[in-house]
Image (cartoon, rainbow, N blue to C red):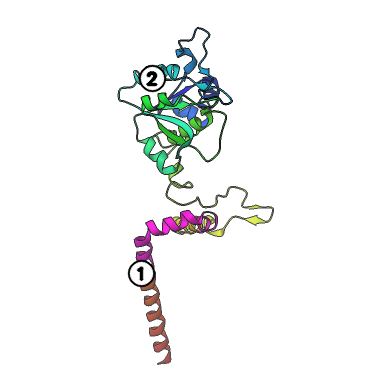
Amino acid sequence: MRIDIATLFPAMCDAVLNTSVLGRGIKNGFIEIHTHDIRLYTEDKHKNVDDKPYGGGTGLVMQAQPIYDCVQAIKAQHKAPPRVIYLSPQGETLTQGKVRELALEEGLILLCGHYEGVDCRVLEELNAEELSVGDYVLTGGELPALIVCDAVARLQDGVLPNEDAYSIESHYNGLLEFPQYSRPEVWRGRAVPEVLLCGDHKKVTEWQMEQALEITRQKRPDMYEKYLQDHAEEFAEKAAREAKRAERRRRREEKKRREDDQ
């Protein structure tokens, strides 16, 4: 997969892209991420990329020409047409589901606005999607673009050690993640739950699922209700199995009582 970031501040993005999980993923060839300086594409002799907005108002608006030429130059480097995404507080809110969708693409171009935004005509010309990382406003689109890169890169084969590294995390399967513990076994009087020390993988997995459900119910009741609705059939089957086991236990206990009475 290839991601390109069109920005006025490529150095800001490069500082993050060259470190930690992202940096290793890029270095090892599991994902390509490139930054492009929009200012290099301006036709203005003073290298200006913004101007005052028509109709008045404070701040400056990024002009269409340098953005368009930058994105077109990036597109020419892709084998297949990439999706163009403008990071904007007006866009669709980023979710883990959206991340999974984007992670399946061959190429993405992330356009970072700045100042008072961009000339809307270039968004129309590029048929750009708008994507938001939350209901708040930032100085520019660089931080949201890096969030998208990080979230999408984690789902690419090889970037993380294995699928378990992300499939058990919050939001991936519709639930928040279960509590995590590390050494020492007891810290300031707080002990690691005994089930995590028993070595029984099945019991550990069941405990983790129970905890994930309870934490989601407490902290995100909206997610919890949706999960119950989406997995209603699964829960019904589980309840039926538990009812059968309970009935078998009752019959065994009843049989034992009769035998003891004799």
Tag 1 or tag 2, which sits nearer the N-term? 2
Whether pointer 2 and pointer 1 mark residues with C-beta atoms closer than 8 Å, the reply is no
Q: Which residue is mark 2?
A: 74
Q: Report x, y in % for residue 119.
A: 46, 24
For this orientation, the residue located farthest to the left is 80
**255 in relation to 87, above or below:** below
**Residue at horizontal 44%, vertical 20%?**
64
Choose mark 2 or mark 1, whichever is in front: 2
Percent of width and height locating residue 129: 40, 32
Disc 1: which residue: 240
The residue type indicated by label 2 comes to: Ile
Residue, x 35% and y 27% (percent of image)? 82
Distance of label 2 from label 1 (alpha carbons): 56 Å
- 77 or 71, which lies in front? 71
- CA neighbours of label 2 inside 10 A, class few (<14), some (14 to 19), many (20+): some
Magenta span contains residue 140? no
The quadrant in which residue 110 appears is top left
Q: How far across and how far down the image is residue 10, in percent?
A: 51, 20
Q: Which residues are magenta?
A: 214-242
Q: In screen coordinates, is 247 left or right of 191? A: left
